[in-house]
Amino acid sequence: MNRENYPQSKEDFDTRLHRAQENNDAPGRVGKPGSSQSGKGLAFRIGTELVVTVFVGGMIGFLLDTWLNTKPWLTILFLFLGNAAGLLKIFRLTSNQNYTVGFLQKKRRPENGDK
């Protein structure tokens, strides 16, 4: 390809890059930088997570109740466990932990020679 066909200079590229970065940081954008979810998408995911975890917990409890003949105790127990699991998922999602184990990030210990 010929440079004559593309007369754009490095300065032109820098100005376009700077303008694009300013547009990216514009107010009114939803979510944290690096987040790919919009506000509606996040709300839909939160609702779905809670409903699915409670449903799965209830189904596990119902099936165990039917198998062990202990109706309704395991269904009630697993409904509460499903609710707790759903709320924990929502907490991790909204606090931007993205399903990491534990509540705090472990600090990296310096290796030999690193300070």
Image: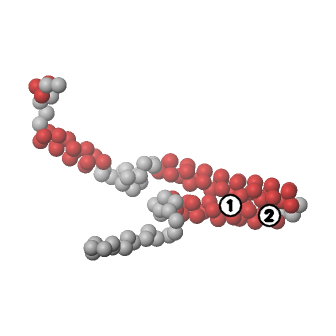
**92 relative to 62 in the view: left or right:** left
Q: Position of residue 9 (x, y in %)?
A: 11, 36
Displayed quadrant of residue 83: bottom right
For disc 2, the marked residue is 74
Q: Percent x, y for residue 17?
A: 21, 44
Picture quadrant of residue 46: bottom right
Q: Secondary structure at mark 2?
A: helix
Q: How packed is label 1: few (under 14 Cα within 10 Å), some, or many (20 or more)?
A: many
Using the image, tell me which numbered label, if any, was put on residue 17: none
Q: Residue furthest right?
A: 69
Q: Give the image location of residue 30, x and y in percent.
A: 41, 52
Classify the position of the N terminus by image quarter: top left
Q: As drawn, is 64 to the left or to the right of 86?
A: right
Number of marks in picture:
2
Residue type, label 2: Leu
Query: Vertical placement of 75 versus 104: above or below?
Result: above
At x 41%, y 52%, the residue is: 35
Is residue 74 positioned above or below 31 on the image? below
- Mark 2 Cα shell of 10 Å, populated few (<14), some (14-19), many (≥20): many
User: At 20% from the left edge and 47% from the top edge, which residue is drawn?
Assistant: 18
Q: Residue at x 89, y 61 (%)?
A: 69
- Upstream in sequence: badge 2 or badge 1: 2
Mark 1 residue type = Gly
- Point out which mark residue 82 bears: 1
Where residue 105 sits, quadrant-wise, is bottom left
Please name whichever residue, 2 or 5, is drawn nearer the observer in this view of the structure: 2
Gap in angstroms between the C-alphas marked 2 and 1: 12 Å
Give the side of residue 8 with respect to residue 20, left or right.
left
